[in-house]
Amino acid sequence: MDKVFSADGTAIAYEQQGSGPAVVLVGGAFMTRGDSAGLAGLLAERFTVVTYDRRGRGDSGDGPEYDVQREVEDLDALIGSVGGEAMVFGMSSGAVLALEAVARGSAVSRLAVYEPPFITDDSRPPLPADYVARLTDLVRQGAYGDAVAYFMTAAVGLPAEAVAGMRQAPFWGGMEATARTLPYDGQVMGDTMSGRPLPADRWRSVTGPVLVGSGDAGAPQMLRGARELAALADNFALHVFPGQEHTIAPDLLAPVLTGFFGGGERA
Protein backbone atom coordinates (compact mmCIF):
# COMPACT_ATOMS: atom_id res chain seq x y z
CA MET A 1 0.00 0.00 0.00
CA ASP A 2 1.07 3.56 -0.71
CA LYS A 3 -0.63 6.95 -0.33
CA VAL A 4 -1.03 9.99 -2.53
CA PHE A 5 -2.27 13.38 -1.36
CA SER A 6 -5.29 14.95 -3.00
CA ALA A 7 -5.64 18.68 -3.71
CA ASP A 8 -7.20 19.33 -0.28
CA GLY A 9 -4.44 17.40 1.51
CA THR A 10 -6.45 14.22 2.09
CA ALA A 11 -4.35 11.04 1.97
CA ILE A 12 -5.71 8.46 -0.49
CA ALA A 13 -4.52 4.87 0.00
CA TYR A 14 -3.79 2.82 -3.10
CA GLU A 15 -2.04 -0.27 -4.40
CA GLN A 16 -0.31 -0.68 -7.74
CA GLN A 17 0.62 -3.83 -9.62
CA GLY A 18 1.63 -4.94 -13.09
CA SER A 19 3.30 -2.98 -15.87
CA GLY A 20 2.21 -1.25 -19.04
CA PRO A 21 -0.37 1.49 -19.65
CA ALA A 22 -2.07 2.69 -16.46
CA VAL A 23 -5.61 1.64 -15.50
CA VAL A 24 -7.34 2.96 -12.36
CA LEU A 25 -10.27 1.00 -10.88
CA VAL A 26 -13.00 3.05 -9.17
CA GLY A 27 -15.26 1.14 -6.78
CA GLY A 28 -18.92 1.65 -5.99
CA ALA A 29 -20.79 1.85 -2.69
CA PHE A 30 -19.16 -0.08 0.19
CA MET A 31 -16.17 -1.08 -1.97
CA THR A 32 -12.58 -0.72 -0.82
CA ARG A 33 -9.48 -1.49 -2.84
CA GLY A 34 -9.50 -5.14 -1.76
CA ASP A 35 -12.83 -5.72 -3.46
CA SER A 36 -11.19 -5.10 -6.85
CA ALA A 37 -8.19 -7.36 -6.20
CA GLY A 38 -9.39 -10.22 -8.41
CA LEU A 39 -10.02 -8.00 -11.42
CA ALA A 40 -6.81 -6.06 -10.80
CA GLY A 41 -4.75 -9.25 -10.79
CA LEU A 42 -6.13 -10.30 -14.16
CA LEU A 43 -5.61 -6.87 -15.75
CA ALA A 44 -2.08 -6.61 -14.32
CA GLU A 45 -0.92 -9.11 -16.93
CA ARG A 46 -1.12 -6.26 -19.48
CA PHE A 47 -1.45 -3.03 -17.52
CA THR A 48 -0.25 -1.06 -14.53
CA VAL A 49 -3.34 -1.35 -12.35
CA VAL A 50 -4.22 0.98 -9.48
CA THR A 51 -6.85 0.11 -6.89
CA TYR A 52 -7.67 2.57 -4.14
CA ASP A 53 -9.85 3.35 -1.15
CA ARG A 54 -12.20 6.19 -1.98
CA ARG A 55 -12.09 8.96 0.61
CA GLY A 56 -13.61 8.06 3.94
CA ARG A 57 -13.05 4.34 3.42
CA GLY A 58 -10.40 1.83 4.37
CA ASP A 59 -6.98 3.43 4.84
CA SER A 60 -7.84 6.72 3.09
CA GLY A 61 -8.52 9.94 4.94
CA ASP A 62 -11.42 12.34 4.53
CA GLY A 63 -12.12 16.04 4.56
CA PRO A 64 -14.48 18.04 6.79
CA GLU A 65 -17.07 18.65 4.05
CA TYR A 66 -17.88 16.39 1.11
CA ASP A 67 -18.12 17.53 -2.47
CA VAL A 68 -18.02 15.39 -5.62
CA GLN A 69 -15.19 17.59 -6.88
CA ARG A 70 -13.00 16.37 -4.01
CA GLU A 71 -13.37 12.80 -5.29
CA VAL A 72 -12.54 13.96 -8.80
CA GLU A 73 -9.38 15.52 -7.38
CA ASP A 74 -8.58 12.24 -5.61
CA LEU A 75 -8.71 10.45 -8.94
CA ASP A 76 -6.59 13.18 -10.53
CA ALA A 77 -3.94 12.68 -7.83
CA LEU A 78 -3.86 8.95 -8.52
CA ILE A 79 -3.59 9.55 -12.25
CA GLY A 80 -0.74 11.95 -11.56
CA SER A 81 1.08 9.25 -9.60
CA VAL A 82 1.14 6.95 -12.66
CA GLY A 83 2.36 9.48 -15.20
CA GLY A 84 -0.41 12.02 -15.68
CA GLU A 85 -2.78 10.03 -17.91
CA ALA A 86 -4.66 6.78 -17.39
CA MET A 87 -7.54 4.64 -18.49
CA VAL A 88 -10.31 4.15 -15.94
CA PHE A 89 -12.87 1.50 -15.06
CA GLY A 90 -15.77 2.49 -12.80
CA MET A 91 -18.18 0.10 -11.10
CA SER A 92 -21.76 1.04 -10.08
CA SER A 93 -21.72 4.50 -8.46
CA GLY A 94 -17.99 4.51 -9.17
CA ALA A 95 -18.96 4.46 -12.84
CA VAL A 96 -20.83 7.73 -12.41
CA LEU A 97 -17.93 9.23 -10.46
CA ALA A 98 -15.60 8.25 -13.31
CA LEU A 99 -17.95 9.82 -15.87
CA GLU A 100 -18.03 13.01 -13.82
CA ALA A 101 -14.24 13.07 -13.58
CA VAL A 102 -13.82 12.77 -17.34
CA ALA A 103 -16.51 15.38 -17.95
CA ARG A 104 -14.68 17.75 -15.61
CA GLY A 105 -11.37 17.34 -17.41
CA SER A 106 -9.51 14.47 -15.77
CA ALA A 107 -6.75 13.03 -17.96
CA VAL A 108 -8.53 9.81 -18.93
CA SER A 109 -7.86 8.41 -22.39
CA ARG A 110 -10.40 5.57 -22.26
CA LEU A 111 -13.26 4.95 -19.88
CA ALA A 112 -15.14 1.73 -19.15
CA VAL A 113 -18.10 1.54 -16.78
CA TYR A 114 -20.25 -1.29 -15.49
CA GLU A 115 -23.88 -0.89 -14.46
CA PRO A 116 -24.14 2.70 -13.26
CA PRO A 117 -27.29 2.30 -11.11
CA PHE A 118 -29.53 4.69 -13.00
CA ILE A 119 -33.31 4.72 -12.57
CA THR A 120 -34.64 6.32 -15.73
CA ASP A 121 -38.28 5.25 -15.89
CA ASP A 122 -41.20 4.23 -13.68
CA SER A 123 -40.43 0.50 -13.61
CA ARG A 124 -39.34 0.81 -9.97
CA PRO A 125 -39.63 3.55 -7.35
CA PRO A 126 -37.11 6.39 -7.69
CA LEU A 127 -34.98 7.59 -4.82
CA PRO A 128 -36.91 9.69 -2.30
CA ALA A 129 -36.27 13.41 -2.72
CA ASP A 130 -34.73 13.56 0.77
CA TYR A 131 -32.61 10.42 0.28
CA VAL A 132 -29.19 12.03 0.81
CA ALA A 133 -30.44 14.14 3.73
CA ARG A 134 -31.87 11.10 5.51
CA LEU A 135 -28.68 9.09 4.96
CA THR A 136 -26.61 12.01 6.24
CA ASP A 137 -28.72 12.26 9.41
CA LEU A 138 -28.33 8.54 10.11
CA VAL A 139 -24.56 8.74 9.64
CA ARG A 140 -24.28 11.78 11.90
CA GLN A 141 -26.17 9.85 14.57
CA GLY A 142 -23.72 6.97 14.24
CA ALA A 143 -26.60 4.70 13.15
CA TYR A 144 -24.50 2.95 10.52
CA GLY A 145 -26.60 -0.21 10.46
CA ASP A 146 -29.73 1.83 9.86
CA ALA A 147 -27.93 3.76 7.11
CA VAL A 148 -27.03 0.49 5.37
CA ALA A 149 -30.60 -0.73 5.73
CA TYR A 150 -31.98 2.49 4.28
CA PHE A 151 -29.60 2.26 1.33
CA MET A 152 -30.56 -1.34 0.67
CA THR A 153 -34.28 -0.61 0.68
CA ALA A 154 -34.43 2.86 -0.92
CA ALA A 155 -31.54 2.64 -3.39
CA VAL A 156 -31.16 -1.07 -4.11
CA GLY A 157 -34.88 -1.75 -3.80
CA LEU A 158 -34.78 -4.80 -1.53
CA PRO A 159 -37.79 -5.58 0.71
CA ALA A 160 -37.39 -4.46 4.31
CA GLU A 161 -37.91 -8.04 5.50
CA ALA A 162 -34.99 -9.28 3.41
CA VAL A 163 -32.74 -6.50 4.71
CA ALA A 164 -33.69 -7.29 8.32
CA GLY A 165 -32.45 -10.84 7.78
CA MET A 166 -29.21 -9.58 6.23
CA ARG A 167 -28.27 -7.81 9.47
CA GLN A 168 -27.19 -11.17 10.88
CA ALA A 169 -25.00 -12.04 7.91
CA PRO A 170 -21.18 -12.00 8.24
CA PHE A 171 -20.82 -9.34 5.54
CA TRP A 172 -23.04 -6.80 7.32
CA GLY A 173 -20.21 -5.54 9.52
CA GLY A 174 -18.12 -4.75 6.47
CA MET A 175 -20.93 -2.66 5.02
CA GLU A 176 -21.37 -0.78 8.29
CA ALA A 177 -17.63 0.01 8.23
CA THR A 178 -18.04 2.07 5.05
CA ALA A 179 -21.60 3.28 5.65
CA ARG A 180 -20.46 6.80 6.51
CA THR A 181 -19.66 7.31 2.83
CA LEU A 182 -23.09 6.28 1.53
CA PRO A 183 -24.22 9.94 1.37
CA TYR A 184 -21.18 10.55 -0.84
CA ASP A 185 -22.42 8.00 -3.36
CA GLY A 186 -25.84 9.63 -3.19
CA GLN A 187 -24.32 12.97 -4.14
CA VAL A 188 -22.33 11.37 -6.95
CA MET A 189 -25.53 9.89 -8.39
CA GLY A 190 -27.35 13.23 -8.19
CA ASP A 191 -30.71 13.06 -9.96
CA THR A 192 -29.87 10.03 -12.12
CA MET A 193 -32.04 7.76 -9.94
CA SER A 194 -35.09 10.01 -10.16
CA GLY A 195 -37.08 7.98 -12.70
CA ARG A 196 -36.45 10.55 -15.42
CA PRO A 197 -34.41 10.04 -18.60
CA LEU A 198 -30.72 10.85 -18.41
CA PRO A 199 -29.95 14.48 -19.25
CA ALA A 200 -28.63 14.50 -22.80
CA ASP A 201 -25.92 17.08 -22.12
CA ARG A 202 -24.59 15.97 -18.71
CA TRP A 203 -21.58 14.14 -20.16
CA ARG A 204 -21.38 15.90 -23.52
CA SER A 205 -17.76 16.83 -22.83
CA VAL A 206 -16.78 13.13 -22.59
CA THR A 207 -15.40 12.73 -26.10
CA GLY A 208 -13.02 9.77 -25.77
CA PRO A 209 -14.00 6.11 -26.18
CA VAL A 210 -16.42 4.88 -23.51
CA LEU A 211 -17.44 1.24 -23.01
CA VAL A 212 -20.74 0.80 -21.14
CA GLY A 213 -21.16 -2.67 -19.66
CA SER A 214 -24.19 -4.37 -18.15
CA GLY A 215 -25.39 -7.85 -17.34
CA ASP A 216 -28.74 -9.09 -18.59
CA ALA A 217 -29.71 -11.21 -15.58
CA GLY A 218 -29.93 -8.63 -12.80
CA ALA A 219 -32.32 -5.81 -11.97
CA PRO A 220 -33.92 -4.74 -15.27
CA GLN A 221 -33.30 -1.02 -14.69
CA MET A 222 -29.54 -1.64 -14.81
CA LEU A 223 -29.58 -2.76 -18.43
CA ARG A 224 -32.10 -0.07 -19.36
CA GLY A 225 -29.88 2.59 -17.82
CA ALA A 226 -26.79 1.23 -19.57
CA ARG A 227 -28.59 1.24 -22.91
CA GLU A 228 -29.72 4.81 -22.35
CA LEU A 229 -26.21 5.92 -21.42
CA ALA A 230 -24.67 4.19 -24.43
CA ALA A 231 -27.17 5.91 -26.72
CA LEU A 232 -26.10 9.41 -25.65
CA ALA A 233 -23.21 9.70 -28.09
CA ASP A 234 -21.45 7.83 -30.88
CA ASN A 235 -18.31 7.38 -28.75
CA PHE A 236 -20.29 5.37 -26.16
CA ALA A 237 -20.57 1.65 -26.94
CA LEU A 238 -22.69 -0.96 -25.12
CA HIS A 239 -21.46 -4.43 -24.16
CA VAL A 240 -23.96 -6.85 -22.58
CA PHE A 241 -22.61 -9.73 -20.49
CA PRO A 242 -25.00 -12.70 -20.76
CA GLY A 243 -26.08 -14.21 -17.45
CA GLN A 244 -24.35 -11.57 -15.31
CA GLU A 245 -25.83 -9.45 -12.55
CA HIS A 246 -24.56 -6.38 -10.69
CA THR A 247 -21.71 -8.40 -9.21
CA ILE A 248 -19.88 -9.63 -12.30
CA ALA A 249 -17.32 -12.42 -12.48
CA PRO A 250 -13.83 -10.89 -12.89
CA ASP A 251 -12.77 -13.59 -15.35
CA LEU A 252 -15.61 -12.55 -17.67
CA LEU A 253 -15.04 -8.83 -17.27
CA ALA A 254 -11.23 -8.79 -17.57
CA PRO A 255 -10.95 -10.00 -21.21
CA VAL A 256 -13.45 -7.40 -22.40
CA LEU A 257 -11.65 -4.62 -20.54
CA THR A 258 -8.30 -5.86 -21.81
CA GLY A 259 -9.54 -5.67 -25.39
CA PHE A 260 -11.04 -2.23 -24.92
CA PHE A 261 -8.08 -0.73 -23.04
CA GLY A 262 -5.79 -2.33 -25.61
CA GLY A 263 -7.26 -0.13 -28.33
CA GLY A 264 -10.51 -1.67 -29.51
CA GLU A 265 -13.26 0.90 -30.10
CA ARG A 266 -15.91 -1.68 -29.31
CA ALA A 267 -15.63 -4.88 -27.32
Image (cartoon, rainbow, N blue to C red):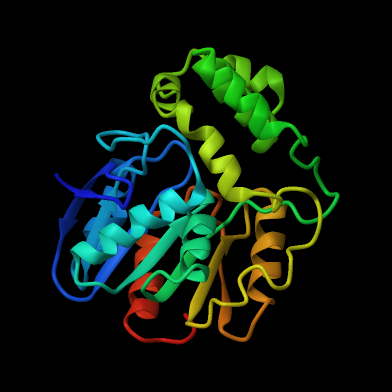
Q: Is residue 206 above or below residue 94?
A: below
Determine whether, in the image, residue 211 is placed left or right of residue 217: left
Determine whether, in the image, residue 66 is placed left or right of residue 227: left
Q: Quadrant of residue 18?
A: bottom left
Q: Quadrant of the N terminus?
A: top left
Question: Relative to the observer, which residue lies in front, 41 or 98?
Answer: 98
Counting from the top left corner in percent of width and height, residue 235 is at: 56, 84
Q: Is residue 28 above or below residue 256?
A: above
Q: What residue sits 52% from the left and 39% below the top? A: 184
> Taking the image as drawn, is residue 250 in sight?
no
Question: Relative to the observer, which residue lies in front, 8 or 45?
Answer: 8
Q: What residue sits 61% from the left and 20% below the top? A: 137
Counting from the top left corner in percent of width and height, residue 153 is at: 68, 28
Q: What residue sits 67% from the left and 53% below the top? A: 118
> Taking the image as drawn, is residue 206 in sight?
yes
Numbered circles on residues, count: 0
Counting from the top left corner in percent of width and height, residue 257 is at: 38, 71
Determine whether, in the image, residue 57 is placed left or right of residue 163: left
Q: What residue sits 25% from the left and 72% below the top? A: 84
Q: Is residue 62 above or below residue 219?
A: above
- Residue farthest to the right, as pictured: 122
Counting from the top left corner in percent of width and height, residue 87 is at: 34, 72
